[in-house]
Amino acid sequence: MSRFQKLLHLDQSILLYVRRWHLPWVTVAMKGLTRLADPSSFVVIGLALMASDTPNGLKMGLRLGAGALLATATTQLLKRVLKRNRPDVGINDFQALSQNPDAFSFPSGHTGAAIAVAVSLMGFDATLTATTLSLAFGVGFSRVYLGAHYPLDVIAGSLLGLGSGVVVRVLMP
């Protein structure tokens, strides 16, 4: 077995291990975390920030939108090029706990966007930074828990989100 095959086997093993934690109330919470990183959620939050009467509202809303857009575009492009099947297709008798938004798994778009937003919003307020980073990591875990992604998908999405967030912070100081 090659190193790459061993890595993919470990990836699948971790996913199946996490699945053992399945509890109905945790599933509801994980679905809620995932919804926080849906594009519609980012649009609503970004517009609310831009419309707010706070000194940094417009800047925060624009950074949020730019980070989410850049991460989403990057992850979607890579998904179409790499075409890794989702776990419910790649593992016999495995069922995801939620509807998958598309056919491809690698990298995680929800995680990428959530991390990009968190990094884009860093520097405004320490509490905001801690909250958005915590939620972003929760989104990543929720994607594995719900069976939408393998752990490596989430790691790759996190790295792309980090890069997207940094680009936004450099271009929109």
Image (cartoon, grey):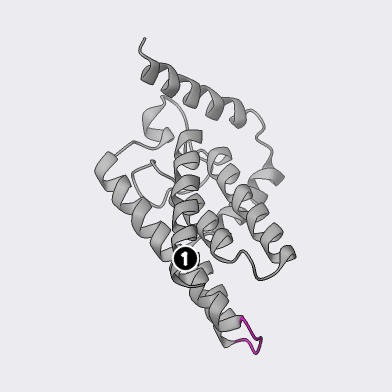
Instruction: Name the residue nearer the viewer: 112 or 91.
Output: 112
Q: Quadrant of residue 87?
A: top left
Q: Please provide percent x and percent y for residue 166.
A: 49, 58
Reply yes or no: does residue 54 show up in magenta. yes
Which quadrant does the N terminus fall into? top left
Looking at this rendering, what residue extends furthest in the top direction?
1
Which residue does the image show at 62% across and 86% down from the upper left? Answer: 52
Looking at this rendering, what residue extends furthest in the right direction?
127
Whether residue 62 is visible, yes or no, is yes
Which residue does the image show at 48% across and 25% down from the upper left? Answer: 12
Reply yes or no: does residue 104 show up in magenta. no
Whether residue 148 is visible, yes or no, is no
Which type of secondary structure does the marked residue at label 1 adopt? helix
Q: Give the range drawn in magenta.
A: 52-56
Which residue does the image show at 56% across and 46% down from the upper left? Answer: 140
Q: Please provide percent x and percent y for residue 65.
A: 47, 71
Q: Is residue 151 above or below residue 30?
A: above
Instruction: Name the residue nearer the viewer: 119 or 96.
Output: 119
Q: Please provide percent x and percent y for residue 139.
A: 58, 50
**Tag 1 residue:** 170
